[in-house]
Amino acid sequence: MQLTGLDWSIVVAYFAISLLVGLIFSRRAGKSIQEFFVSARSLPWWIAGTSMVATTFAADTPLAVTGLVVQKGLAGNWLWWSFAVGGMLTVFLYARLWRRAEVLTDVELIELRYGGKPASFLRAFRAAYLAIPINALIIAWVNYAMLNVLKVTLVGENVSDWKLLAIMLAITGFYTMLSGMWGVAITDVLQFVLAMAGCIALAVFAVQNVGGIGALQEKVVAAGEGGTHALDFIPDFSSTAWLTPKMFLSYIFVMWWASWYPGAEPGGGGYVVQRMASCKDERHSLLATLWFQIAHYCLRPWPWILVGLVALVKYPELRTAQDAGIGYPRVMKEVLPAGWRGLLLTAFFAAYMSTLSTQLNWGASYLVNDIYKRFCVRNASDHHYAWISRIATVLILICGAVATQFVESVERAWLLLLALGGGTGAVFLLRWFWWRINAAAEIAAMVAAFVFFILAMWVIPHKGAFTFLDVAEYRTVFIALLTLIVWLCVMYLTAPESPKTLEQFYRKVRPASFGWAPVRRLAPDVRTDDGLFLPSLLCAALGVAVIYTVLPAIGALIFGESVRALILLAVAAACMTALIIILRRIGWQRVVG
């Protein structure tokens, strides 16, 4: 793909602006780790929420969605659409609790919720686990996706991966190391706008290239076995040519609560908690998370899906390929006219850098706040910790570069992470509302998930009754259910947390008291969320309904099904109206205060 002078000027201008933002916020970020990691808790909701959306955009996501569409049809996206349930629970049940906890990282909550040496061990272990191997895996698949885009569209296959990686990581690492969370969040807003504009433009050109939206539908239907079901939003249970009914049910009933996944952690976690902690107050925290969920599921997917459908039509051999996501950059290379190529490459750089900068800052926050400051050097100056934060950023960057060499496809990396965290999600959901959960249970969940992952991948022969373990989604369900049994048993076989620890957590966070009966008797004066719990659950259900009606409604509008689109939008409007009425009845200040 040849770039003109205009294309190159767009790319260069974007990098110059990103580096300028890093320089502008460098002095502010160097004041303290509060500034470096959570913007001194002063972000407005729209910046924090857009930053979350930009982070989950990434260079890998369009490629992964393309792979899902090519190999499993439109309904294949339920692999990640199903997480909307947990996302809306985070908005209405957990966002205010996280903000009340006033933690800098999600693992800092561990020593607030649990006590003694087990809590200290769990905090240190989980911080190291998330900062190095897990974060490296996430950075690796983002790097892998960006390398594929550049090699297919711009530089060719003969350029060394290490040379490309060095350039990409040096630019992003430099402004992230300088500017901290302020620079990351501000550039995320710019990057999200650029990435969305570029992806929409590509979708338009791609659809035009195959003859328009009507021709695209006809060609998708003719693309192969079961082609008539490739465009089903809900898979046809009589057909297994695309997404099987069992796989769909595993997404809907297990995946969203069972696994820890970045951006869709059960009950909130990772960089979502970091953004919530960066907000001005609980109200901004809730609004930021709500905006993130709506934009994440309703605004972003259709440009990627359309390109995925075009890739299915143009490259049918990808249905059986190991990395079907390569269809996205191939479409870019084939359909983009001069002048637009620079914008699309800039969009991908923006998506890539927004995710990478967050992963670097987020991973460094664990190393500094939860390991170095907590266990190594406790009373150093703010300036000292700020410099250690920059060093930790570089360490995370190097680990991610090394891990990139082991990624085979983006979708496989997604599924690997889901399986690794199988079964841990239930602990993260329940620890806020059930006093009996202890540090031993959470440790058991992490260990059991890893052990069962090893067993399912390499020890248990995939024969006879165990052939289902060949399918990544079923393997995750297997791991999740066994892990759930293990940590429940460990919880009941070990002592609960001390009354003092539980009371301190209860007083600070003020969760609904129905699962805290023994602690409620110790602190009868605490005003908890009892009256908000059921209305919050209803708001979450209505929020999920809004997403699952707006999402297909947009598709119906694109494909000219106006009656269906109007019906779906009417249902969405009714659900949103009911949600607003409930919020007004209980009062915004009671939801967030």
Image (cartoon, helix red, strand yellow):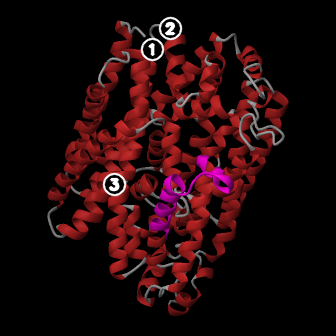
Q: Nearer the viewer, residue 161 or 234?
A: 161
Front residue of 424 and 53: 424
Q: Are marks 1 and 2 in contact (CB under 8 Å)?
A: yes
The residue that appears at 54% across and 59% down in the rendered structure is 422
Q: Nearer the viewer, residue 148 or 466?
A: 466
The CA distance from mark 3 to mark 2 is: 41 Å
User: Quick one: quadrant of the N terminus?
Assistant: top left
Q: Secondary structure at mark 1?
A: helix
The three-letter amino acid code for the residue at tag 1 is: Arg
Chain part drawn in magenta: 445-472
**Which residue is at a point 30% across and 40% down the rendered structure image?**
402
The residue type indicated by label 3 comes to Ala
Q: Residue at x 55, y 88 (%)?
A: 520
Q: Amino acid at mark 2?
A: Pro
* Horizontal arrangement in the rendering, residue 508 relative to residue 76 (left or right): left
* Element marked by disc 2: loop
Asked if the residue at tag 3 contacts the one at tag 1, i.e. Cβ–Cβ closer than 8 Å, the answer is no
Judging by the rendered image, the residue that carries numbered circle 2 is: 337
- Residue 531 drawn above or below residue 26: below
- Label 3's element? helix
Q: Which residue is mark 3?
A: 131
In the rendered structure, the answer to whether residue 379 lies left or right of residue 511 reads: left
